[in-house]
Amino acid sequence: RPPERAASQAKSDQGKKLVIAVIPKSTGGEFWKTVEMGAREAAEELGVEMKWDGPLTETELAEQNKIVENMVTLQVDGIALAPLNRSAQRRTVERAVEAGIPVVIFDSEIDGHAHVSFVATNNKQGGSLGAQHMIELLGGRGRVLVLRFVQGTGSTEARAEGFIETARAGGLEIVADPYPEDATVEGCKKTATNVLEGFVKANELALDGIFACNDRSTLGMLAALEDLRKSGVKVHARFIGFDFTPRLIEALQAGLIDALIAQNPRKMGRLAVETLVAYLRGQQVPEYIDTGVVLVTREKLATDPAVRQLVGLSEKPAGNQGEPSSADK
Amino acid sequence: MWNAMWDSPPRLKMVNIAKRFGTTQALNGVNLEVAAGEVHALVGENGAGKSTLMKILAGAYRPDRGEMWLDGEPFMPHHPLDARRRGIAMIYQELSLAPHLSVMENILLGVEPARWGIIRWRRLREQAYAALSELGLADLPLATPVHNLPPGHQQMVEIARAVISQAKIVVLDEPTSSLTQQDVERLFTLIRRLRDRGLAVIYISHFLEEVHRISDRFTVLRDGETVGSGITSETPIPKIVALMVGREVSELYPRRRRTRGPCILEVEGLTGIKKPVGASLRLHRGEILGIAGLVGAGRTEFLRAIFGLDPVRAGDIRVGVFRGAATPGQRWQQGVGFLSEDRKREGLALSLSIAENITLSRVDRLGPLGLVFPGREERMVARWVDRLSIRCENLRQPTWTLSGGNQQKVALARLFFADVDVLLLDEPTRGIDVGSKAQIYRLIAEAADGSAGTSPKAVLMVSSYLPELLGLCDTIAVMSRGRLVACRPAEQWTEHTLMLAATGQDQENSISTP
Amino acid sequence: MKLPNLANSFRFTRDMWSSPWVTAIGRFAALVAVFLFFAVLVEGGKFYTPRNLENILRQSAVYATAALGMTMIIIAGGIDLSVGSMIALSVVTVAWILDYHYAVPGSQGQVETVYLIHRWPVLLPWIALVAGVLVSVLAGFINGITVVGLRLVPFIVTLGTMGIFRGLAKGLAQEKDIYPREDTWLTRLMDPTLTSHDPHWRAWILPPGVWILIIAAIVAALVLRYTKLGRYIFAIGSNEETARLCGVPVGRVKIVTYTLGGLFTGLAGLMQFSFIGGIGQPTSAIAYELFVIAAVVIGGGSLMGGQGSILGSVIGALIITILYMGGQQMGWPKWVQETVIGMIIIAAVVIDRLRQQATT
Amino acid sequence: MKLPNLANSFRFTRDMWSSPWVTAIGRFAALVAVFLFFAVLVEGGKFYTPRNLENILRQSAVYATAALGMTMIIIAGGIDLSVGSMIALSVVTVAWILDYHYAVPGSQGQVETVYLIHRWPVLLPWIALVAGVLVSVLAGFINGITVVGLRLVPFIVTLGTMGIFRGLAKGLAQEKDIYPREDTWLTRLMDPTLTSHDPHWRAWILPPGVWILIIAAIVAALVLRYTKLGRYIFAIGSNEETARLCGVPVGRVKIVTYTLGGLFTGLAGLMQFSFIGGIGQPTSAIAYELFVIAAVVIGGGSLMGGQGSILGSVIGALIITILYMGGQQMGWPKWVQETVIGMIIIAAVVIDRLRQQATT
Ligand SMILES: Nc1ncnc2c1ncn2[C@@H]1O[C@H](COP(=O)(O)OP(=O)(O)OP(=O)(O)O)[C@@H](O)[C@H]1O
Ligand SMILES: Nc1ncnc2c1ncn2[C@@H]1O[C@H](COP(=O)(O)OP(=O)(O)OP(=O)(O)O)[C@@H](O)[C@H]1O
Ligand SMILES: O[C@@H]1[C@@H](O)[C@H](O)OC[C@H]1O
Ligand SMILES: [Mg+2]
Ligand SMILES: [Mg+2]
């Protein structure tokens, strides 16, 4: 954690408009779009210029490294980075810091201490939140499948870990925890399909619970389950996913998903930028900022206004129900 | 002279050589003996196996059986380099150069002077220069990629390649088909020099007059077997032909009186990108009009420009009632057909069937609304396959399975199938043996007569083989440096006057259109 | 000289083995062999349940449909590396139209979002379908005129347009996935029907997408075999110079071929849209060109042009799919699957070459 | 006997414009133009800081190094679609060796894990380096003998091995990323040196990986120009039949070419290993073959064989990299970047064709 020099540098920067780079794990997908939204809002409010760029999918390490380097070249004042890999990119971050550019890490953890602050969901807690609910749903017994996401990634690995630990402690059996083929919905769906096929016995899916670690893997699993159902296989497994997208919310309402663990991507984007700017302006920032995680069930979705707001369901009464905020358009 | 050498073993002895390609027995027990210090001609019909035999000698193919001796030593090359090292230099029938490499690299390809695998450029340049000098082409640019050279010079580069190696035997497989008369003379001088130096030269050609001029002895192949050999000066050409074909070719040119019909093709001042230059010509139904000229005179370009394959810069073309330039597609529609001199590159789609090749220019005749009815196609094609006696197993056979002569007939059948009124034929018998030639001449004549059951056609025929022009055509024009310099009835021409006109020494030099 | 009548036009030694029928039967035998292999090995006969058979068709449909156009292009001596991107472009276009909305001033001075799908619930899916196909047709046309107009190697042109079309797909989707407001029948195009609970869908017997494939394949095969266009495509691939000499409008035929390629790829795009669950994902179908080309090659297409068959390519797509599905259902690790598929691609071509050698 | 003097072997009208030097200068001009474009547009002169110049070299090194081998293969008339997979295979191999460990019975009856890197801290990185390169050499050799031995089109062979090598990389890594126990100097191969605080690294002036590229490029260019092997590669690509008849050992030369391709790809693999932070990621370098081929083609290589140059390909790799970097630094959206790169690839080839036309 580079201490003093921020304050001194902050002074020299005064008067000049700050330029910061925000680098997500990928530029595709609902989750990152929402993060971008939050980040942009914050940047506008704080009067800083923001550059947003990331790799295509969440496996392209070399790509993300190049983007970080190019931002260093541009001598942006600060970088907020959601690292693809917690150990492999440690040096990437250290190099940026060596070049005099403070880095705030968000969404996913990174090894080392070069960064200024870490703004993220408590992912492990999110995982165990899911496991607790699963234990409740299954009454403390059952065979559960966990669909992971990209290996080596701070966020989703912590979720899987949190889930598995808590679930095991609560008496559940983890029968498989595969990584998907790649970081796309398709890739997740393919892997989910293959793995599920192995549990189909006598036209029945011999699983009691399923957990997926983020939006892509939840979507893929959802699609795979739908295919199974449509082809006449009985599915009684409880399904808990992570993150929300309009499609996932619909599925939750329709009973295809039992619960979603929701992070707050908008807030995450917002806080990442706010923290970075605060640091650049010479303020004290905490080492870790928790952006919060909640369990969303069908009931909460219908009744809890905070939850409804979080997932973007309109606050207006019944008639307009289901209208997403569609802030991107 | 070569008689004296019989005491020592012959330079080359090939005994009982056989080679089979799939179902084709290309060679079936061939014997060949060549002495040092002689030019030995190898002749035979298309597909007799000449090139195959030489490729075995050069190590490109392995024979199925048979033995070879080189200067009395057993000889069986495993690959071309092997043969080259033992003193076999080969100039293949098809041009075989690496177009991107320079002249000097091509000359020394495969035998570059090198130390530790590193090329010694200086020495390479010297050796290439020496070889070219010997051919009288010292001014050829050594570092230019060969694709920038005209075809004649490309052929000379290949010959230089053979000269360079310390060869004992030099094989030339149809070397003259793309050479100018001047280059042919230069080549013959070189061949004689090589012979006098004690090398053995094997010379393959369908131009029997050339064979007669240059060779000391000859060997005839027929259907993959040796059917005879002898001393050239003691054997008249017709006898060699009889050995090749297995019968007397009595009437090579079907001479008949024809009546000239109306003018159907009129060309006025046609000028292409480089050639032709202001060429004019009138062609009538019932007429066979030949165009003579040296290689590179622009005859091919003339036909291509008429047919819309090459751009036209100036001039006018009239076909029947149609005026002006047109695409090949339109030409076919107007009743004009074109036979290319280059079968392999553009004449035939070799992987398509016989039927498909024949109908390709008039697919619209195979059914209404852009449809194709295979049954109808086969009926229509069968007639022409029969008329041209194309030897094949069935109509859906890929064209590459046919022998060269039969491939040529397929290309020709396309014009008959399309029932065109004007046949533009470019070297219709290039590389074709004597027997097949006679058959092709008969077909062309029948078309012009109208004796094939249709109305008389008009034929415009380019050929470098003067006897064929004199024997077949009613009228002959000469093209020189892109200009049509003379056009007279065939009776008024002799080989000599044609030659003079082609080289631009014709006294009268008048364009007379009778 | 006699006419080559049928009796003598049939020599057992050579012609029989190289006849298109024998070739097709050979490929079919390979397909059956691959199928039987897994039918025996996958436990409990699960591999040949009607459900799995339907799945084989459903999962191979996208590749097979795109392979129809690729077959034509490859026969004409070309190649199209941009099919994956074109599929994505179609997918995104369909979703974009289904999700099209605009803002109107609402009742209380608020802005209200109006979705076109709510206005035109019947018409809009059709518009989306047509637009989704058309965009690929246009893309194919662009490939065609670039190859012909600039006289460039198709490999390079389509390598370029692969980037361009993918970029446009992402641009249209604003670099995220588009989630259409409502599910329409377009989303259900590839749904299994055999086991469906909905009698309406059951009546289809096979998923509508598979029907599209079947009809498209028949049309493509007929075009290649029984039309002038088909003849020209073969002729150009066999020897472009000859085709030109014979009056074939080479440029125009090539453009039409690439455009037809776009048409079939557009249909494949519709299927992909349904298959990934009715969303507009611009990163969809990455690297599909390789599978599609592989299907054509396994099916007997030659990258030198002049050779290939629709039936063969469809069989090729089925073989690839069965290998994947079988490998998955056998629980082979992913890496084994990839390795095996790689080997099969090579093996297929080797066998083809051996067969051809045996007949010459 | 006189030597032909230079004057007569040099025709000004034609030869001058098609001479390799003019061609090279033309390409260099294109590179400079692209560079200047961004140098002007990227604010504050940041595009031509020493740091960015170093970055351009670092970021293009993987493509450029792999392009060296690809250049040879393409000149010989072949193609290699498996380079991306080969890079991944090398990356995984290096990581696997660095992470190699085994269990021994520990002090209190417990099992203890021993890491080889702790035993042989100096030697092991070297072993990993050699093995990482060798595995790609072997892979290239396999491509070569398959193309030659089975007489297959390289497109198909390497499409197959693309799957096979990727599969093997995943298999070796057990379908996960490998995290070597310790960082070694191998991880730092591509670290920037200019801005490094470590004087030891600074002394290198450029990152060691870039040096490897420079040396490899010089060697490759010399091989192509001054050795028999190099001329044979050109001869085979120019006219394989002629080369065979002239006694060039075609098969052997092709095998050597693909194997050399593997060698350079292996070196690129080392760089990639460092560039992604020293882990063994089997999904790394997906689709890199396309960039590498594009670099060669932009650099003047012809997919028909017989043409291409090392300098050109390196310039091609630099152009592609500068376009990406410039696009990012200008803040172009991703989709614009992709679209632009696609267009540039096509434009590069068009310009090349025009230039060639002008000289003939
Ligand atoms: N590579 C090959 N594959 C199959 N058949 C071949 C091959 N090479 C030659 N043949 C066949 O072998 C026979 C002899 O061919 P070859 O080329 O030796 O004839 P040639 O005497 O040189 O004829 P031409 O006068 O036309 O050059 C022909 O029937 C030919 O079709
Ligand atoms: N200088 C040259 N460079 C390259 N190609 C040439 C050159 N001259 C002629 N050619 C080609 O060689 C072939 C024959 O040339 P051209 O048409 O001028 O002569 P021709 O009188 O028809 O001779 P031929 O009897 O060989 O057909 C043509 O295809 C032509 O394009
Ligand atoms: O870390 C990211 C996670 O927070 C989100 O849920 O999905 C994408 C992930 O990689
Ligand atoms: Mg011959
Ligand atoms: Mg000619």
Image (cartoon, coloured by chain):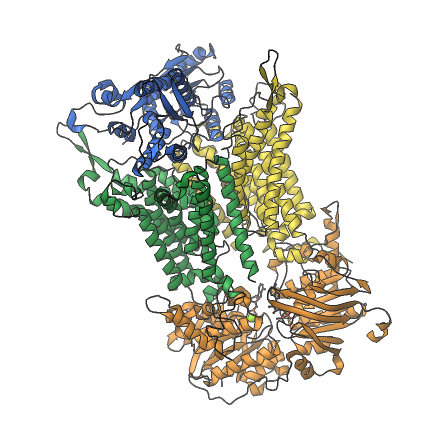
Chain colours: A blue, B orange, C green, D yellow
Q: Name the foreground residue: B251 vs C143.
A: B251
| Ligand 4 visible in quadrant | bottom right
Q: Name the foreground residue: D106 vs B245.
A: D106
Question: Residue C111 in the image: x percent, y percent?
Answer: 18, 30
Left or right, residue B447 beside residue C207: right
Q: Name the foreground residue: A256 vs D58.
A: A256
Question: Residue B244 in the image: x percent, y percent?
Answer: 66, 78
Q: Name the foreground residue: A78 vs A184.
A: A184
Can residue A327 be seen here? The reply is: no
Compared with residue D201, is residue D4 higher up or lower down, i.e. above or below?
below
Compared with residue C329, is residue C143 higher up or lower down, i.e. above or below?
below
Question: Residue A230 in the image: x percent, y percent?
Answer: 30, 38
Can residue A229 be seen here? The reply is: yes
Question: Residue C76 in the image: x percent, y percent?
Answer: 45, 57
Number of callouts = 0
Q: Which residue is at 46% across, 64% downward? A: C243
Q: Which residue is at 55% across, 67% downward? A: B401
Q: Quadrant of residue D221?
A: top right
Q: Residue farthest to the left?
A: C107
Q: In the rendered view of the protein, which quadrant contains the C terminus of chain C?
A: bottom right
Left or right, residue A127 beside residue B294: left
